Amino acid sequence: MGKTSKDKRDIYYRRAKEEGWRARSAFKLLQIDNECHILDGVNKAVDLCAAPGSWSQVLSRRLNENYKKELEAGNGIPPKIVAVDLQAMAPLEGVIQIQGDITNINTAKQIIAQFDNEQADLVVCDGAPDVTGLHDMDIYIQGSLLMAALNITTHILREGGTFVAKIFRAKDVDLLYAKLKIFFPYVYCTKPRSSRNSSIEAFVVCKDYSPPNGYTPHMLNPLLTHEAYNSSELEGINRVIVPFVVCGDLSQPDSDTCYPLDFEGKEYTYHDPVQTPIAPPYEEALALLENRDTDFRRSDVSVVVDNMNSMTISDFKKQAKQKRKGMNECETKPKDSKEADCEDASGNKEIIDDCDDCKYDRP
């Protein structure tokens, strides 16, 4: 494949190199901002799953442009941008990088520390799993990644802030929307022009972060530390306890105990089932058993050949033919003669399978 082949096929890939973006995904965030104005009034921004850094580049350029305009107006605040990823990323001017796990509470604490113990105005996440080609699995992993991004966002985003993340528009996407609506009154899905039409990829834009009253952010189950989950630490609205009610009392029979047929002094009498199945799944198997030519209790073997280590292939074929011949002769004998011993062609008494009248027991 030539160097220019991908440039011909993907206009955004070519433009990204021409304009100095690290990846074509930069145009997705640019187009989302042009439509939804997510960067207006933002001074502190967080880029989750940031590598290779194209979205961090967009944040850096756009926020610094806004800062210069504010300086001209006389009230500018320098922007702060924090990029987080498990992978190492090449440095970017004006971007603070944290190599960490977004499911770990320590990562959230490091982000807050970079903002001088203040929360962010905007959190974006363009993270996606390494797709396997198994669509159901890829959709599930992407949904889990989105929920992990939402979880850390509840720690680092101020009330009224904005959250933007990648989502796969699959059949169960409404469940993800419902979870997002718990924290954001405004949730809508957008599809940038730079996102391929053949992809189920889209982006959720969630504005005006408003957690439920009494909600306390937590990370009790980080994915990469294998720590034990302890739900007893949750309190208030964070923990819902469903009542468990046992029906009956100790005078009732125990369902795990075997009782004699004559139970509680009553003589046992067998009763047929009140209603037998009218179309059982095993009906076809019962019909086959009724056919005398079909017996599932017998092994599917026509000839048994002795196992001899020194036997050659020709000897094996010869012995098999002899046993087959003896079996056929046994089947053609009159009923009275079948009571005689079944012998193979060599004169030795052998076990011949499928000969019901042979007096030698099968092994």
Image (spheres, grey):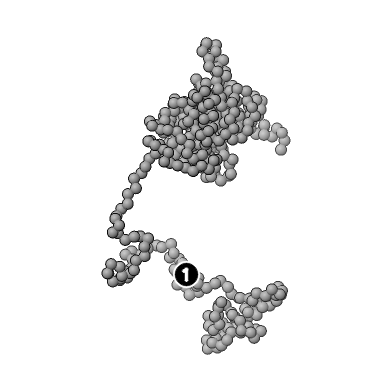
Question: Which of the pair 103/227 is nearer the observer?
Answer: 227
Number of marks in the image? 1
Is 231 placed left or right of 97 in the picture? Answer: left
Report helix, strand or loop for mark 1.
helix
Residue 332: x %, y % from top left:
57, 84
Residue 145: x %, y % from top left:
52, 38
- Give above or below for 162 relative to 342: above
Q: Residue at x 56, y 71 (%)?
A: 300
Residue 326: x %, y % from top left:
61, 82
Report the amino acid beneath label 1: Leu
Q: Residue at x 34, y 45 (%)?
A: 243
- Give above or below for 73 relative to 356: above
Residue 359: x %, y % from top left:
54, 84
Question: Which of the pair 45/220 is nearer the observer?
Answer: 220
Q: Quadrant of the N terminus?
A: top right
Q: Residue at x 58, y 73 (%)?
A: 301
- Name the residue beneath numbered marker 1: 288
Q: Where, by quadrant of the figure, is residue 207 drawn?
A: top left
